[in-house]
Amino acid sequence: MPDPIMYQEDGYVVLRHDQPEQIMEPNEIRQFFTDLFTKEPDLLPTELESLPPTDQLTKLLEDYCELDIPDGFLQWYAVRFEK
């Protein structure tokens, strides 16, 4: 049976085509996506539109790792800071 620590994340590595790599804590990435989808609601995957906003973010972080955005890409990966 896998160790439950495999499913814990301390933060996220965020990669964008126009900026250097960033490390974000869970609350920071949630705010980042809230701001992004407020400005550009069309970027939200259509499968998530029917969910409440907090569930949208949870599902996005759990099941997705990339969004196609105009003129580039946006990727994020869960990371642990300690062994």
Image (cartoon, grey):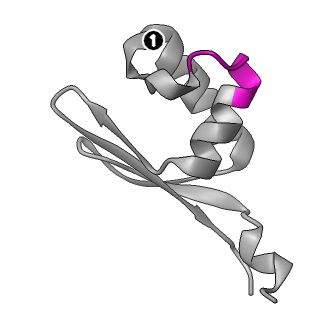
**Residue 19 in picture, x, y percent from top left:** 30, 45
Q: Residue furthest left?
A: 71
Taking the magenta stretch, the answer to whether it contains residue 11 is: no
Which residue is denoted by mark 1 in the rendering? 41
Packing grade of label 1 (10 A; few <14, some 14-19, many >=20) is few
In this rendering, the answer to whether 6 lies above or below 61 is below
* Relative side of 74 to 80, left or right: left
In this rendering, the answer to whether 2 lies above or below 47 is below
Residue at 77% over, 67% down: 8
Camera-nearest residue between 28 and 63: 63
The tally of labels here is 1
**Residue 40: in sight, yes or no?**
no
**Residue 45 in picture, x, y percent from top left:** 45, 27
**Residue 67: in sight, yes or no?**
yes
Amino acid type, residue under disc 1 in the picture: Pro
Taking the magenta stretch, the answer to whether it contains residue 54 is: yes
* Relative side of 44 to 73, left or right: right
Task: Locate the C terminus by quadrant.
Answer: bottom right
Residue at 77% over, 86% down: 2
Helix, strand or loop status at disc 1: helix
Camera-nearest residue between 46 and 7: 46
Residue at 46% over, 51% down: 65
Camera-nearest residue between 23 and 66: 66
* Relative side of 79 to 10, left or right: left
Task: Locate the N terminus by quadrant.
Answer: bottom right
**Residue 14 in picture, x, y percent from top left:** 46, 51
In this rendering, the answer to whether 28 lies above or below 23 is above
Residue at 81% over, 78% down: 5
The magenta stretch spans which residues? 49-55
